[in-house]
Image: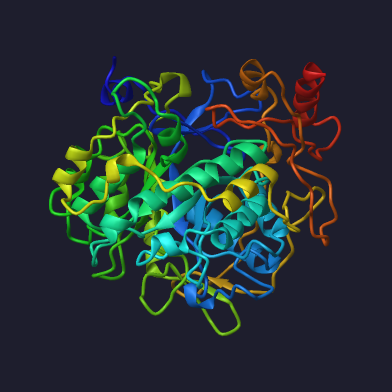
Amino acid sequence: MFSKKFLLGLLAASPALVQAVLPIHAKSYRFIRPSSPDNDPSDNEVFFIKGVDYQPGGSSAFKNDGSEDVLSDAETCARDAVVFQQLGINTVRVYSLNPDINHDKCMTILNDAGIYVILDVNSGNYGENLNRADPSGSYNSLYLGRIFRFIEAFKNYPNVLGFFAGNEIINDEKNYASIDPQYIRAVQRDMKQYIAKHSNRTIPVGYSAADNVQLRLATFKYLQCNVLNGTTINKELEESKSDFFGLNTYGWCDGDDWTSSGYSIINSTFTDAVIPLIFSEYGCNKKTPRTFDEVSEGLYDGLVDEFSGGLVYEFNEEANNYGLVKLDSDDNLQYKDDFENLQKQYDSLKLPSIKESSVANDTLYKCDGAAITSIYSGFGVMNFSLPAQPTDIASMIKNGVAANNTGSLLSDYTAPTFSYTIKDADGNVQTPTLSIDSTNLMNALSTAFVADVSSTGSSSVTSTRASSSSSSSSSSSSANSTSSNSSKSKGVAAINVPAGSGLFVLLSGLITGLL
C-alpha cells in the first residue's frame, strides 16, 4: 500500500476547482468535495478547510429563549459573507445556535457565497450540553431531544459540513478524563443513528479536543477506533466513533517554528488517522498583531499530509483579543492587522490537488485500551463499553422529534444590501460586493443515491433547494432513508437557474438521465 506521503508526492499542484457548494463527504482521513453533481471519485477533490471560528458577541450573548442568534439576521450575514470572501475562507465554525428559530436566509447567503459551516450542537446553557462533571446525569432525553431538533433544523442545508458533538468536554481537571469519554461516544452514536434515519444524506459528526498534548492524543485514539479484534468492524463502535476530529491548539505563537511550536510532535503522533483531522481552533495571540506564520509554514505545509486545514480563532473582537475584525456600537466593521495578515497567508497558499480516487480507503482502527492509557493513565476506556441507550432516546430516534423548524435553502432569494460600513485596517472605506458563482447553486448530487439502492433496496430523490418565500419559515421534511456507510448525499436539487444557461443545460441533462 502506498503511504500518504508517497501519494501526495505524486500529485502536483493544479489550479483550484471552481468552488461549488455540493455536500462534503469523508473518505478515510480526508474530506471530499464533489466536483460536479455526478460525484465521480476520479474528478472529486480532497477538500482543505480554510476557515474561522464565528460567534459574534461571544458565548455569553447566546440566549436559548431568544428569537435571534448569529445566523438569524440576514443583513448581518450578508455583511459577514462579503468579508469572508475577502478573507479567502471556505468554512466557518459556529458554536451556539437556537434550533427552534429559522436560519434559511443566512444559510442560503453562506451557501451562495461558497461558505461551508461546521456547527456545534451544544450551548453553554443548562441542559444543552453534556455536563463534564456529571455525564450520566446530563445524558438524558431532554438534552438529546434538543440535539435532534438541531439536526432537524440544519440537515437539509448542503453546506453543513458537519456537527461537533462536543467541545473540550474531556480535560485534565478532576476526574473528567475518566468519566466522560464513553458518554461522548454515546452522544455521537445517538446523533449518527438519528441522521441515518431522518436525513437524506450522511452528515459527519465529530469532536473538538482540548489543548493538552497527551490528553488530545488519547482522546483521538479512543474516539476513532471501531475494531476490537483487529480485523472486523464492530457495529456499535462504528456507530459511536467520531467521523472527524478537531484539535484546539495554540502552540505556534509569532516567533515560533516547526519544532518549538510542537507541530513536529503533532506531525509524528497523528500519522495513523483513518478519519479527517483539522485544527478546530488555532491562532496564538501572545504577540500582536498576529502574522499567522503557522498557516504557510505549518498547518498547510508540514502538516498537510495528515491534516485537512483548520479554523482560526476568531472572527470578531471580544475581550480576549483574538478577533480579526472589530465592530463599533453601530455594527460597522473594520479589519484588524490580523485580518490582513491572515488574508495574505491564505492568498499565498498552494495546496496540493488530490483526487478522491487517490485516497486509500482505510477504515479500520483497533481499540487498544493499553495504548490509550499508556498515553494518559487516567483515561476512562471502560473496556470500550458504552452507556445503554435509554428507551425514550431510542423512541425519538425511531419516530423523530416534533420539530417545527426544518430548514432548507431558499430559491429566488437575493442577499439583502446592508447599511454597515466596512473599513480596512487603515480606516479606508471598502466597497466589496457578494460574489455568487453559479456553481454554488448546485446543491445536491445526481447519482450518489444509486450506491445506496444496492444495499438497501430502495432510494429517495428529494429536493434540498426547495422553492419557498424569502420571508417564510421553511418547514419542509426530507424523506426518511437508511444511510449506507457512504457520506454521500442522495437526491437531486430543484435549482432556479436561467433557461439556456450552461448550468441549466448541464442540470437538465443530468436530471433527464435519472428519470
The residue under the point 41% across, 46% down is: 185
Camera sees residue 22: no
Q: Where residue 206 sits in the image (x, y, percent)?
A: 44, 46
User: Picture quarter containing residue 307?
Assistant: top left
The residue under the point 57% across, 49% down is: 391
Q: Nearer the viewer, residue 211 or 53?
A: 211
The residue under the point 61% across, 60% down is: 432
Left or right relative to 224: residue 83 = right
Q: Nearer the viewer, residue 182 or 454?
A: 182
Rendered position, 162 above or below 52 = above
- Name the residue at the front extreme: 391
Left or right relative to 232: residue 430 = right
Work out which quarter of the rendered image holds the N terminus and state it.
top left
Q: Where residue 164 sits in the image (x, y, percent)?
A: 47, 52
User: Picture quarter containing residue 80?
Assistant: bottom right
Q: Nearer the viewer, residue 95 or 398?
A: 398
Rendered position, 373 above or below 363 = below
User: Picture quarter containing residue 478?
Assistant: top right
Rendered position, 373 above or below 137 = above
Q: Where residue 389 sits in the image (x, y, percent)?
A: 50, 47
Q: Where residue 133 sits in the image (x, y, percent)?
A: 35, 67
